[in-house]
Image (cartoon, rainbow, N blue to C red):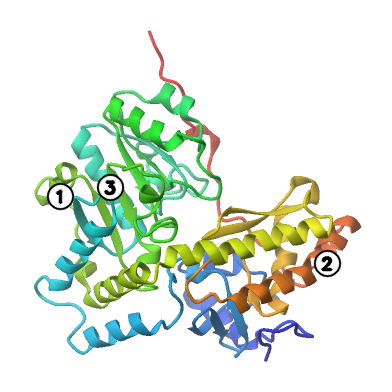
Amino acid sequence: MNGIQFNETYPDITVSDQYYERALTVQKPITQTLAKGPGQFTKGVAPKYLDRGKGSHVWDVDGNEYLDFNAAIGPISLGYCYPVVDEAIRQQLNKGITFSLMHPLEVELAELIREVVPNAEAVKISKTGADVCSAAIRVARAFTGRDKVFCCGYHGWHDWYIGVTSRNAGIPEAIQDMTYTFEYNDIDSIRAALDETVAALILEPFIFEAPKPGFLEELAEVCRQNGTLLIFDEMWTGFRIALGGAQEYFSVKPDLAVYSKACANGMPIALLTGRADVMELFDHEVFSYTTFGGEALSLAACIATIKELRDKNVPAYLNEKGGLLKDGYNQLATELGMAHLTKCIGYNCRSMVTFAAEAGNGLELKTLMQQEMIKRGILWAGFHNMCFSHSDEDIAYALSAYRDVLPILKEAIESGNVKSYLHGEVLEAVFRKTSNYNIKPKVTA
């Protein structure tokens, strides 16, 4: 079994492959989350199933150990099996999980969210990011009496959003025609296109690119002037860039905001926060309910996680340690004469390795990097999703692996045949947005 070291061989993934063959006969799709599926981890080299985790490390079903920078695609903000959170779950488990009436933890969590999230005049609790994104859009339409939505980023699988992507089968055209995409940092196109038909503008406050000076502030103002509700999708930014999310970090308060990934260290919960006059429509006019919204294990985990994030000043830690990793990668690329070929971008709490167009096929390059990082005991998917359990030793090891792997990447690029260096299948693209949904300036008579 391979471990976190410069292994001589790629990991044995026999048991992973056995589970995969079984799954092919009973599951469609094969994965519950595309980012965790075999298309994003090179088949033939990468494990397909994980068995357990502790801190910043995970073990696959074959017993191979890895340093993990994926953070379960975001939810692990403190670390796997984090004692404080696990104890809160255990204590609540002794009392019960889901009940026939409301639970006091619903009130306690909402009060805590109001303390830490700037726009949280009111709080709605649900289960997944897609849930609260869709609830935000529905209540925005009800509040404004308008139908159209402008969006930027990824906002879940529900009809109103996924219709703007290439995977829009099953979405009625009438619904597709109500959602439009816009380019991040392009305030002029937004200002030109906003009109009295636009109910809401939803965006991730940042993904990897930083907002231009004044962009978010201007966005809030043009939305206010147009009577359009501004929604921040803070699935990735919430509780990571700052305790109160990007709205705290940039001092820009949206009308509504949605959170999920980082706030419960892996337990399923989602939050919608916002203006009381908008949120009160959920009392009678707008329907958005789920049986498991008050599930108590997740509530307990969420409260424990947020208190730990606050008391240990975890966002500052993520910024510091993530900066060491991001800057260290870029320094290595410079030292190796590769700065024109690859760069690590983004905010320190969540950065991404990128490849220049001149370096070649991006998916092939990412596959090669992943293949070699996995051989060295790092479960790598291109991102550094930092958590509180990532130590100085983890970062030093990751940088030593990059120092070993980047020359292989350089050699492959210079050979002109990156694919010949691969031992598994090339990674797949998830999906793409389609260009016909881009916003157009409003027509004037």
Circle 2: residue type: Ile
Of badges 1 and 2, nearer the viewer stands 2
Position in image of residue 322 (x %, y %): 56, 64
Circle nearer the N terminus (1, 2) = 1
Quadrant of the snapshot with the N terminus? bottom right
Q: Which residue is mark 3?
A: 136
Residue 89 in sight in this render = yes
Residue at x-position 53% and y-position 39%: 434
Query: From what the image shows, is residue 265 above or below residue 260?
Result: below
Circle 3: residue type: Ala
Q: Which residue is mark 1?
A: 282
Disc assigned to residue 408: 2
Left or right of 287, for residue 37? right
Position in image of residue 65 (x %, y %): 61, 85
Q: Quadrant of residue 195?
A: top left
Left or right of 92, for residue 398? right
Circle nearer the N terminus (2, 3) = 3
Residue at x-position 50% and y-position 38%: 184
Disc assigned to residue 247: none
Of badges 2 and 3, nearer the viewer stands 2
Q: Quadrant of residue 415?
A: bottom right
